[in-house]
Amino acid sequence: MARYTYLNRERFAGKRILDVGSGTGVSMLSFFKEPLTNLPEHITMSDYSDDLCDFLRNNTPKQESIGVDIQRIDWTQKDTYEHLKNQRIDFITGTDVVYKGCPYNDLAQMIDFVHKNNPQLEVLIMLPSERPNGAEFIQTMKDLGFEFSKTELTGLNFQAFKSDKESKNMYPGLTQLVFYMYSYKKPAP
């Protein structure tokens, strides 16, 4: 997602982004990289872990051009995201947030909740191929009235070490994965 947001900055210019499952925040940090052009108006990074939220608060660069806040949001606890009801959100982004054992139904319900007051909302979820629960999440989103498109992300380098051999030994199968960007929107009534 970090490379995608960096290469598609103009898409996010002046927009408000809610990044779900932010973890260490890498996907949104691309907006702090030069050149500082086509910046979003505001980024909210979120995670269910208090420790990760503290990490984000302590390590996210300060940038006068972008409003940034960190929020603890647990998709399984509506009281942690009800405050989003009256906020303008143009994009929800998430990287690898659907996996075996994740509460993907709750994620879909949270997205639908945010959409109710943000009909322009677009949801961008990046997932590797063959992700357990990916098809179930897609169906849940379709059941909620979202349409989606799927784009293969090409030209991404996932070499983790100095050589392909070393990378494949440490992370077998990673270089064989294909990554997709799923874009969800609800059609206008």
Image (cartoon, rainbow, N blue to C red):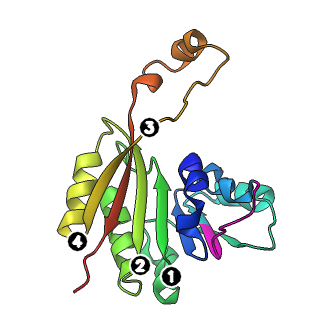
- Magenta highlight on residue 35: yes
- Tell me where the magenta segment starts and ends, as one range: 34-44
Q: Are marks 2 and 1 in contact (CB under 8 Å)?
A: yes
Residue 154's tag is 3
The disc label shown at residue 114, or none: 2
Q: Earlier in the sequence, mark 4 or mark 2?
A: 2
The tag earlier along the polypeptide, 4 or 3, is 4
Which residue lies at the image location 41% right of the left edge and 83% below the top edge?
118
Residue 20 part of the magenta-drawn span: no
Instruction: Inspect the image, locate mark 4, and give the three-letter code of the amino acid beneath it.
Output: Leu
- The residue wearing badge 1 is 84
Residue type for callout 2 = Val
In which image quadrant can residue 53 be found?
A: bottom right
90 to the left or right of 100 = right
| Residue 58 spot, x, y in % from top left | 80, 58
Q: What's under tag 3, amino acid-wise?
A: Thr
- Of the numbered discs 2 and 1, the one sitting upstream in the chain is 1
How far across and how far down the image is residue 97, in percent? 44, 51
Instruction: Report the Cα–Cα distance between label 4 and label 3.
Output: 29 Å
Q: Residues within 10 Å of mark 3 (few under 14, many from 20)?
A: few
Please say if 166 is above or below 188: above
Residue type at mark 1: give it. Leu
Tell whether label 2 touches label 4 (CB within 8 Å). Answer: no
Crowd around label 1: few <14 · some 14–19 · many ≥20 (10 Å)? some
